[in-house]
Amino acid sequence: MHAFLAPVREDLVGIHSYGAPQLDVPARMNVNENPFSLPPELAEAMGQAVAEMASGLNRYPDRDAVALRAELAKYLLAESGVRVDGARVWAANGSNEVMHHLFLAFGGPGRLAISFDPTYSMYPEYARDTFTTYQTLARTEQFGIDVQAACSAIAERKPTLVLLTSPNNPTGTGLPMDDVHALAQASLDVDALVIVDEAYAEFRRAGTPSALELLDQYPNLVVTRTMSKAFALAGARLGYAVAAQQDVIDALQVVRLPYHLSAVTQAVAVCALEHADVLQAQVALLRHERDMLSQWLADQGYRVCPSDANFILFGSFEDRQAVFDDLLSQGVLIRVTGPHGWLRVTIGTPAENARFREALTRSGSANVVGQGKS
Ligand SMILES: *Cc1c(COP(=O)(O)O)cnc(C)c1O
């Protein structure tokens, strides 16, 4: 047979696909999911919703997901008091796809996206896929943004996309509103879109604002959210964005694939939104567990990054891989990510968090922790 060398795009040769391990261990605390399964009555309601529309699956779904986008707008009003029109909301298969759409429409060859490292590891992949140049500015020692330096960089380099992540992954840090103001204005000055990725917004501590509140002040602002984290719906794949201006949504319509959001996804998401209060009943508990675990880690002498999300970045370890491996051998899966020496743990159920504490205590006493423990 004729040998075939698949003509993979040159820039993709040798690149491996993204993905954290999916391991069946007792405590899965590595991808920031909500650890609580759906309440049985809600799972039943979802099943019912799907059963009711199943016979209509011979038809393509509502291409514009009108009902779903209206429900999302209603939810945002309840959650943050910000009134948005469903027409300004964009929905897709996870906020990953929303972001991909944003890069497709506003990035591209010869264009620049700027973000702030350490941050979400998927951003450079969207840039690569869309031939967008991707540059990062370093965060401060406390993992905040040096706003003055950032504003000058934006003025000089003239990106078309500026990515702010608040609360940021993997650090958990939320951005102060003043910073968002300054960065949105600097972006506006060079006609750049400023995207605030608020995947973890519902976990933010009291006093940490949402950029949704700025939508009527900055026409270049887009806020993205997801149902994967607080809504305990990572498996359904539903992310969304709110844009200050209609023409942003119009551009996303152009680049999306036809019927990108399945009728099943739309039905499940609408059902979940109708039960938003039930689904999010655990968010307060998770925030409380996060604050307790942060305190516990600090009490053990670790460095802890103050978190507005459902995970904690902590360190620092001489050999973080060894600590990760040791925890895994005890049935606790966390994440090797972030700056050298740090590890990230997702907040689990109280039982999982207890298991994590015990496992880390054992690793510590087995002297796996390096001199970084101060
Ligand atoms: C988890 C996460 C997302 C959401 O991904 P989905 O595709 O909606 O599951 C987006 N941004 C950040 C920073 C995240 O950590």
Image (cartoon, rainbow, N blue to C red):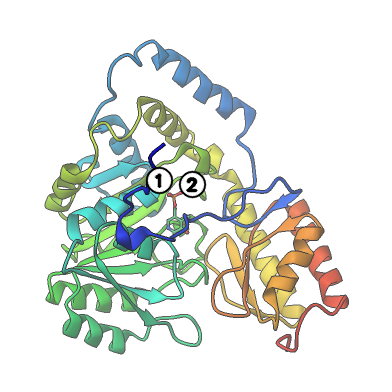
Query: Residue 300: image x %, image y %?
Result: 77, 79
Q: Determine the image quadrant of residue 307.
A: bottom right
In percent of width and height, residue 290 lies at: 64, 63
Residue 136 in view in this figure: yes
Quarter of the displayed picture in which ligand 1 can be seen: bottom left
Please identify the quadrant where the N terminus is shown.
top left
Q: Which residue lies furthest to the front in this view?
A: 1
* Few, some or many residues within 10 Å of mark 2 (<14, 14–19, 20+): many
- Mark 2 close to ligand 1, CB under 8 Å: yes
Circle 1: residue type: Gly
| Ligand 1 within 8 Å, label 1 CB | yes
Q: Which residue corresponds to the image point at 49% horizontal and 66% vertical from the top-left?
A: 169
The residue labelled by disc 2 is 228
Mark 1 falls on what kind of element?
A: helix
Q: Name the residue under label 1.
A: 94
Q: Do the residues labelled 2 and 1 touch (CB within 8 Å)?
A: yes
In the visual, does 190 lie left or right of 116?
A: left
- 215 or 109, which lies in front? 109
Q: What residue type is labelled 2?
A: Ser
**What residue do we see at 17% from left, 64% from top?**
109
Say which mark, if any, is on residue 1.
none
User: Which mark's residue is nearer the viewer, 2 or 1?
Assistant: 1
| Figure label count | 2
- Screen quadrant of the C terminus: bottom right
* Front in this rendered view, residue 339 or 173: 339
Q: Is residue 133 left or right of residue 119?
A: left
Task: Give the farthest residue toward the top.
Answer: 55
N-terminal of the pair, mark 2 or mark 1, is 1
- Crowding near pointer 1: few (<14 within 10 Å), some, many (20+)? many
What SS does tag 2 mark? loop
The reply, left or right, for residue 72 in relation to residue 316 is left
